[in-house]
Amino acid sequence: MPKGRGVRAEIRPFAEDDLESFHATVSARDQRLADVLLVAAWTGLRWSELREARVRDFVRVPMPVLLVSRAAPEGVEAKVTKSGKSRRVPVADRVLPLVLACAAGEGPDDLLFTTRSGHQLHASAVKPSVAWSRSAPGRRIHDLRHTAACLWLAKGVDPVTVQAWLGHASIATTNIYLHHLGSAADRAGLERLNAPGGAGGAPERRSAE
């Protein structure tokens, strides 16, 4: 059987609180890389796309977005994105100041996300710099992209929009995150189950007369 082209089932996204703890831990080692990794977790850019993003790709008006049209896998020349199409990814308020800081003082053709010394990102150098195996045990850098998808869905962004932001060719790929996270209907149903006075509580005993 040919291998599927969707997201691997064994995803390990960060919960939002865990992501903040991860950011704080990594910040103690390298603030710049901690901020870049947090941006990755809120924008869902693939590592190759993050490496190739240019200052001109960050647009602030009418709303802050990243224009994703190129990717630079490590060891090969830059090329178009995996889907072959460009897309727009909103920049949430949580990471907007971080993206602004990365763009400050740089030219439009300069790389947007770099190391403190201005060099292009390389996973082989980033991971030891942030002690990745201890800071994010059991996770891959690609799980930052999975984190973004789960954050968006948990905050109520509809799956079709998440599909567009991630650049998935098929909604079936995006739906893998719903299987992992649960849909809005699942969460609403659980809230109803946990509400006081529901049928799931122990029945009230009546005294014999």
Image: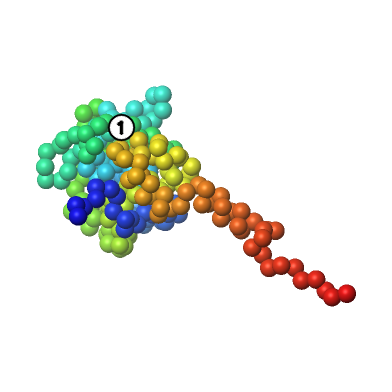
62 sits to left or right of 76 = right
Seen in the picture, residue 66 relative to 116 is either above or below; the reply is above
Q: Position of residue 145 (x, y in %)?
A: 32, 47
Label 1 sits on a secondary structure element that is strand
Residue at the outermost right position: 209
Please name the residue shown 40% across and 54% down the image.
180
User: In the picture, which quadrant includes the N terminus?
Assistant: bottom left
- Identified at 45% across, 39% down, the residue is 158
**Which is nearer the eye, 108 or 2?**
2
Disc 1 residue type (three-letter)? Arg
Instruction: Name the spot of residue 15 as percent of width and height, x first.
Output: 42, 54
Query: In which image quadrant can residue 198 be found?
Result: bottom right
User: Label 1, on which residue?
Assistant: 87
Residue 56: image x %, image y %?
27, 28
Q: Residue at x 27, y 33 (%)?
A: 68
> Is residue 70 visible in this depiction of the protein?
no
> Residue farthest to the bottom?
208
Residue at position x 38%, y 49% from top?
A: 177
Above or below, 80 relative to 209: above
> Badge 1: few (under 14), some or many (20 or more) residues near its Cα, within 10 Å?
some
Quarter of the rendering occupied by the C terminus:
bottom right
Nearest the camera: 115 or 168?
168
Report x, y in % for residue 21: 41, 56
**Going by the picture, which residue comes out furthest to the front?**
1
User: Given the current orientation, which residue lies at the most extreme left position?
Assistant: 76
Quadrant position of residue 133: bottom left
Colour pattern: rainbow
